Image: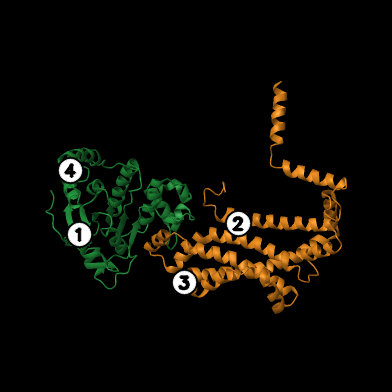
Amino acid sequence: MPRSTQFHRRLASLFSGHWVSPVVFLILWEGGSRLGLIPKSTLAAPSAVIGTLVEMLTTGELPDNLWVSFLRVAAGLVIGLSIGIGLALAAGLSRQGEAAIDPIMQIKRTIPTLALTPLFIVWFGIGETPKVALIAFASIFPVYLNLYSGIRGVDVRLIEGARSFGLSRAEVIWHVILPGALPSLLVGLRYSLSVSILVLVVAEQINASAGLGYLVNNARDFMRTDIIVVCLLVYAALGLGADGLVRLIERRALAWRPNLAEA
Amino acid sequence: MLAETNFTAAFPVSEPVVRLRDFHRSFGANTVIDGLNLSIAPGEFVALLGRSGGGKTTLLRTLAGLDSVGGQDVLIPNSRAVVFQDARLLPWKKVWRNVALGLKGPGVRERAEAALNEVGLGHRIDAWPLTLSGGEAQRVALARALVREPKLLLLDEPFAALDALTRIKMHALVLELWRVHRPAILMVTHDVDEAVALADRILVLDAGRIVAEEHITVQRGERGDVGRVLRQRLLGHLGCEITSEHVLSAVDVGASILPFPQGASA
């Protein structure tokens, strides 16, 4: 008797897990496809998607195009983050910098980056440049806004405490202000990463001959919904990976926060 | 053995570590400090009492060198350190790095460790500040101040946020450290009993002026009797009217706090 109740309890806890509903969803999807309720041209079955994924991996089609997209994001991020961090430091650490930079940045914030796509095409053509430029441009703002407010939000009492021990302005910036603004910087970094992937999707629709966006566009023309779903999965994986990367940095850089484990 | 109350702080014979002459400070139309004279001798323990808004914080900031004095006659030593009410440890630096903040040269960790041992926290040298209790954080702040061997140690209501028991231990620790290192101390406090128990001299600051000054020559730990009288007088200076009934209860409370445990360690 006790063994069977234990079994029942395990069974019950097994089916109350968070994984249940996604699996049921996948089963329904697969079943719907096999019964012909979901036509292949509308949405490929999960099994077909996995088959396509494996095929695209073995032929190298997916890794090659992913690499091209990755380079675009990386280049855009390096440029955008450098500019964003530089501007935030200038605006956060000096009154003149604030007066010169912040108003423009706040005005720019109201314009959606993707609305600038036509202008960027006019300026930079349809090659790699507008793609990288769009990603760079979009990733400036999250990191700028968060780092700037992080610098301004550093506890004044800590700054005064450090000053009372005779620390110079540079030492105060290095020991107090920058570490104090680091959590905000990482929040901005996380937003910048997810924005860069979002912009990548759109930027790669501009006359791409390689990359994830190229794969999607091609697949659309041939109604290959399986390839489209594979690319969606890859986008999701990129987003997850970016988030995981920032979490990893946070765990290392913010080890002093006792509540990080719960976050 | 109480000196007569007079209204300007006496100038000690030896060269003072702190000297302010006719010091003024105002914010806009609001005069916070108005013609203040203050002199603190080397190694002297001065307590500064006063109501909120009486200029205590402004005076402390001036002595800490946090505000510019605008060419007034102000002498403060270069080596000075502050312990604030909130310990103000940098949460992203381990305890010993907080103690060593701004120190240069070799053996910084050893110096920090020695200071932490002095306040009984040698075992928390590599801890993160946010894992410390309030009393521990305040002891780290003391170590951080003392590692600089300051000529002037400023204490800004350093025990106000601590529970009564921890506060008593901290009093003992501060006295012990003061006896060893002999900095001049200016302690800002709201607590009349604390001032009477610890200080050589008590100043009452009100409306930007020193309105009362009391010297205590009785040894610490034997101040029960004079303390009672002094306490009442100081409360009077602070504008706290006491009826005879209140005095009685105040004395009862005072008696339980004032006899200071000599040599008690935290």
| Residue assigned mark 1 | B210
Q: Are marks 1 and 2 in contact (CB under 8 Å)?
A: no
Residue B20 in picture, x, y percent from top left: 23, 66
Calculate the distance from the C-alpha at mark 1 to the C-alpha at mark 2.
Answer: 54 Å
Of circles 3 and 2, the one toward us is 3
Q: What residue type is labelled 4?
A: Arg
Above or below, B225 against A145 in this view is: above
Please name the color used to draw chain A. Answer: orange
Same chain for the residues under marks 4 and 1 in the image: yes
Kindly identify which chain the residue marked by label 4 belongs to: B
Calculate the distance from the C-alpha at mark 4 to the C-alpha at mark 2.
Answer: 59 Å
Q: Are marks 3 and 4 in contact (CB under 8 Å)?
A: no
Q: Are marks 4 and 1 in contact (CB under 8 Å)?
A: no
Q: Which of the numbered marks, if any, corresponds to residue A68?
A: none
Q: Which amino acid does label 3 sit on?
A: Ser
- Using a 10 Å C-alpha cutoff, classify the residue at mark 1 as few (fewer than 14 neighbours), some (14 to 19) or many (20 or more): many
Q: Which of the numbered marks, if any, corresponds to residue A94?
A: 3
B184 left or right, relative to A217? left
Of circles 1 and 2, the one toward us is 1
Q: What residue type is labelled 1?
A: Ile
- Using a 10 Å C-alpha cutoff, classify the residue at mark 2 as few (fewer than 14 neighbours), some (14 to 19) or many (20 or more): few
Calculate the distance from the C-alpha at mark 3 to the C-alpha at mark 4.
Answer: 54 Å
Q: What element carries label 4?
A: helix
| Residue assigned mark 2 | A249
